[in-house]
Amino acid sequence: MACISTPPKFTVSQITSKSPPLSPFLLHFNSKRSHFPRNPSFSSPSSSPIIKTIISCTHSYSSAAPTPPRRRPQYIPNHIPDPSYVRIFDTTLRDGEQSPGATLTSKEKLDIARQLSKLGVDIIEAGFPAASKDDFEAVKTIAKEVGNAIDGDGYVPVICGLSRCNEKDIRTAWEAVKYAKRPRIHTFIATSAIHMQYKLRKSKEEVLEIARNMVRFARSLGCDDVEFSPEDAGRSDREFLYQILGEVIKAGATTLNIPDTVGITLPSEFGQLIAEIKANTPGIENVIISTHCQNDLGLSTANTLAGAYAGARQLEVTINGIGERAGNASLEEVVMAIKCRGEHVLGGLYTGINPKRITMASKMVEEYTGLHLQPHKAIVGANAFAHESGIHQDGMLKHKGTYEIMSPEDIGLERSNNAGIVLGKLSGRHALKDRLKELGYELNDEQLGNIFWRFKAIAEQKKRVTDADLIALVSDEVFQPEIVWKLCDLQVTCGTLGLSTATVKLIDANGEEHTACSVGSGPVDAGYKAVDLIVKEPVELLEYSMNAVTEGIDAIATTRVVIRGENIHTTLALTGEPLIRSFSGSGAGMDIVVSSVKAYIGALNKMLAFKRRLPRVSVSTDMTPVSA
Ligand code: KIV
């Protein structure tokens, strides 16, 4: 990787190892019990008596030999043989899926889990099995398939299921994850005064008793990898935290996750919280400390890194930072920060993630959840490697390190002279494949074949097919939900002379054709009403948006819709309340009405696939929150 492969070129200041290293998070302490070490938690490779760099430019793009990748240490639930190794726990499929509109079908979850495994995440939190039959089945399938796909190096991700602190949830989680080679149960209960008083209506003593008993119960099922989270730890009383954490360690917990559930802490505070837990919890040396930082103040990545610096060796993150409210710490930001600065600023920390898979994982999650990235999103945003101003472009031409701290290639993008407008109607399958690869898409032959024919059709109508056109095509062709209904034909009339009309022909899963006509206030409305006459599912349209992906009259239009059906809900993990599900769909085409109707059908397909699996699992019929 360019960003860590070479020694820093520009050193702002240097110190010898005898000088105390500066904390990158400017930690402040006032607790009497704090034993926060100056450079805590590891004997880092950088503590050898050599000159150390405090602030450095890590990017050099030089031809120096790259640092050989370090081996992932052997997996032992409560211990990491190498103290510098940081486990990456991905919760895109659990916390991430709770983002409004981000509902994923089982097939999409499986695809994402496979991608997470290619990325090399240590633990996949595959869902909340007690929430619904769909969640249960999805976690079970991931446990069976992804949780047993051991690679040549012996790597296989741990598959984890979330559960509230009650026997039914825990048993359901175990029933789902037990098929994995490395199954984990993650159980949680709130420990802050506000949550215990108003949400749980339980005393500290009661919460402590439940936590201890439920961790013991999880172990009694045969699960030797149990994670415990004191929910809202960021606002919990410290002494109570040390006590409850000490008790769950005795009961058999192997990982202690410290959630900043409401994203209220600042990096210095969160680092201090981790350091103090490390210093004051009895038995802590026998478990792994983990972070789970929400992004309400936009500090989740900074807090997560502060936690790692203070001794956490598992970091909970999501792809693109999706999650409840303002989201979670983003995998790509945390991983690339450790990759780029771990050696020099974080005392030698490293992860087992293959960053070249980041782009594909990010695109897949973006497409499947319908949660589009802001262009300036760090690492994976469309502008993350774009250089607009003349001064910057001049610098980039002279030396890429002037304005880039990592190269696009590092995260699986390829910068080539082909970027921009290149493909046309004479371009072949190979050219298309190469360009898609450069854009970060790894497609199989069938997917490529489908894209190729669509590409040819567009190239017949447009002289030049741009990257943006290709991305829209992949989105329309590859990242689509299971097909329940497929658009066959569409005909609309519209204008000022009367009501718009639409005739729609759909094909169902058995290959049968269904046709309907409708009038509407415009062509899209008429088209949607005709679809409704065939599909017969009452839905509410929550969002509709359309974008032209390039300039010009022949641009491809992408449409995104979000719909909500009647009575389609699951359970919110943190509160046990019903979560009303909404479903997104996207479509692309040179005809804006076709693009709109495709997006609507995509959202309906997603909802129908989800609805089919809704009846609850028999192993857990009681969805009452533990507090009730
Ligand atoms: O935000 C939170 O507290 C959680 C826990 C269940 C880890 O998601």
Image (spheres, helix red, strand yellow):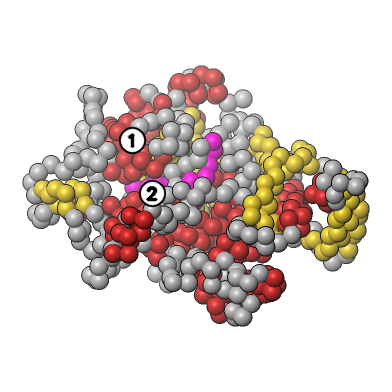
What's the residue type where badge 1 is placed?
Answer: Pro
**Tag of residue 510:** none
Quarter of the image where one finds residue 622? top right
Q: Which residue is mark 2?
A: 334
Q: Secondary structure at mark 2?
A: helix
Which residue is pictured at 40% across the width and 62% down the height? Answer: 408
What's the residue type where badge 2 is placed?
Answer: Val
Left or right of 74, for residue 262: right
Q: Position of residue 417 (x, y in %)?
A: 44, 72
Q: Which residue is mark 1?
A: 267
Q: What quarter of the picture does the N terminus occupy?
A: bottom left
Asked if residue 252 can be seen in this view, the reply is no
Left or right of 106, for residue 220: left
**Mark 1–mark 2 CB contact (< 8 Å):** no
Q: What quarter of the picture does the C terminus occupy?
A: top right
Asked if residue 207 can be seen in this view, the reply is yes
**Is residue 227 found inside the magenta-colored segment of the image?**
no
Quarter of the image where one finds residue 416? bottom left
Q: Is residue 217 above or below residue 210?
A: below
> In the image, which residues are magenta?
312-325
- Label 2, ligand 1: CB separation under 8 Å: no
Which residue is pictured at 82% across the width and 50% down the height? Answer: 523
Q: Secondary structure at mark 1?
A: helix
- Label 1, ligand 1: CB separation under 8 Å: no
Left or right of 166, for residue 311: left
N-terminal label among 1 and 2: 1
Q: Position of residue 372 (x, y in %)?
A: 57, 49
Q: Position of residue 65 (x, y in %)?
A: 24, 71
Q: Position of residue 432 (x, y in %)?
A: 57, 75
Q: Is residue 294 above or below residue 547?
A: above
